[in-house]
Image (cartoon, rainbow, N blue to C red):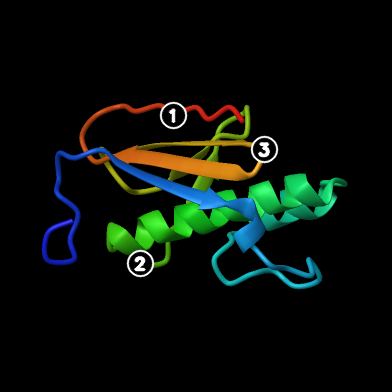
Amino acid sequence: MENGKEKANTMQVLILNIHSIHLDFSEKPEYMDEERWKKTKRIKSEADKKRSCASGYLLWIMCQKMQIIAPSYGYTKKGKPYLQGVENLSFNLSHSGDYAVLAYHKNSPIGVDVEY
């Protein structure tokens, strides 16, 4: 980052340990969109719920860094999130074991995978 702003042509990668997410799962966190929250509540495994919450948190951090106010998510038929109304932003989420990872780039398609 330069002066608090993301460089336009730089890939960014965010990594979060799921154990840093402390939730009681009774109330939607402010950083999660409603669709992800509904999906998270249906998950039985607490670790998988934390992975979903961590992914939502990383999406929120990305939006903060990109100065995207009140993001609106859409979801593909396979459940992959995208930001509605935001052009040329590619991002990809992955989670495994104790980690969730989000990679994003403003002008190029991107993918990320984490295996633990």
Query: Which of the two residues, 92 or 74, is positioned nearer the viewer here?
Result: 92
Q: Are marks 2 and 3 in contact (CB under 8 Å)?
A: no
Count of marks placed on residues: 3
Q: CA distance from mark 1 to mark 3?
A: 15 Å
Instruction: Tell me residue 81's x, y (percent).
Output: 52, 40
Residue sitting nearer the eye, 73 or 92? 92
Q: What amino acid is labelled 1 in the image?
A: Val
Mark 2 lies on residue: 69
Residue at position x 79%, y 70% from top? 24
Task: Give the amino acid at mark 3.
Answer: Gly
Q: CA distance from mark 2 to mark 1?
A: 25 Å
User: Of the residues under marks 2 and 1, which one precedes in the sequence?
Assistant: 2
> Closest to the observer: 26 or 100?
100
Q: Is residue 68 left or right of residue 7?
A: right
Give the side of residue 10 with respect to residue 28, left or right.
left
Question: What kind of element bears circle 1?
Answer: loop
Q: Is residue 35 visible?
A: no
Q: Are marks 1 and 3 in contact (CB under 8 Å)?
A: no
Q: Is residue 106 above or below residue 22?
A: above
Q: Position of residue 17 (x, y in %)?
A: 57, 51
Residue picked out by circle 3: 97
Bin the neighbour count of mark 1 within 10 Å (Cα to Cα): few under 14, some 14-19, many 20 and up. some
Residue 26, can we see it? yes
